[in-house]
Image: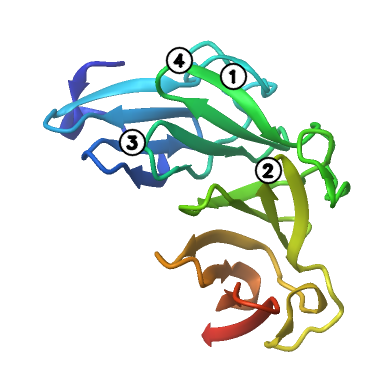
Amino acid sequence: LDNILALSTNLYAMGVWGDTVGNLLYAEQSVCRVRRIAAGSTLVVSVAGTGMCGPGASSGSATSVTFGATWDIFGDSSGLNYYIPDYTSNFVLLVSVSSNTVSLLAGNGNGNSLGDGGSATAAGVHSPLGIYADTFGVTYVCENIDSVVRKISGGIITLLAGGGSNTGEDGPGTAVSFNAPNYIFGDSGGYYLYIADLNNFKVRRIGLSGAIVVRTVAG
C-alpha cells in the first residue's frame, strides 16, 4: 500500500539512503521494490518496482519493472539518480528521479564477473549486493558470490579489488581475497572505500590514492 503513515506500514528494508534535501529511500529485499518517505512527509510511497519479485528487467518505467532482489540503494551527489544492485538478476541499475525510468548501468544478466576493461553493460556482474557512488561520478559495487569489488566509470567496468590468492589481511587490491563482501561506503574526500567482508568477519579499507591497497581496519 502507498500513501500510508510510515509508522503504520510493514517494512522489509535492507538498504537505506537519504538525499541532500531530506528524502529517505529504502530498498525492500523480500518484496523487490524501493519506497520513499519525502522530506517533511510522514507518508510512504513506492517509487521503483512492483512489490512482486520476478525476472529482473534492465529498463522501463520505474514503477512497472520487476526486480529479482533489491538489497541496497545509493544515490549520486545530485540527488537526481540512484543506483540499485539487483542481486539475483545480475544487473546494476540506475533510476532517474526526474523521468521515473530504470536503465542499465552494468551487467548482461549472466552470473559471472567477466568483461573487465570493457563496456559495463556488456560485462557480466555476479550477485551485486552493496553499492556506493562517489562525488566524481564513479560507482563501486560488491559482488557477493565472486567476492570482488568492481569500479564503473565512464561506462567502463574494471576490477578494483579481490579475486586474488592472498588470503592475508593486507596487500595490493587485486592480489587480496574477500569472502562474500556485502556492503560498501566511501569517505567524503574520495580517498578510501570501506568494505564489510562478511564471512571473514572484518571491515576492510581500500586506499584509492596511488596504488590500490587493501587494509583491515576492524575484526
- Point out the frontmost of discs 3 and 1: 1
Residue visible at 28% across and 16% down in the picture: 2
**What is the spatial separation of the Cα atoms under label 1 and label 2, in whole angstroms?**
26 Å
Do the residues bearing badges 4 and 3 touch, measured as CB atoms within 8 Å?
no
Residue 109 lies left or right of residue 133; in this view the side is right
Residue 147 in view: no
Q: Which mark is residue 66?
A: 1
Q: Which circle's residue, 3 or 1, is located before the other in the chain? A: 3
**Disc 3 on helix, strand or loop?**
loop
Q: Quadrant of the N terminus?
A: top left
Residue 127 lies left or right of residue 201; in this view the side is right
Q: Which circle's residue, 1 or 2, is located before the other in the chain? A: 1
Do the residues bearing badges 3 and 1 touch, measured as CB atoms within 8 Å?
no
**What is the spatial separation of the Cα atoms under label 4 and label 3, in whole angstroms?**
26 Å
The residue where tag 2 is placed is 154
The residue where tag 3 is placed is 11
Position of 204 relative to 149 (above/below): below
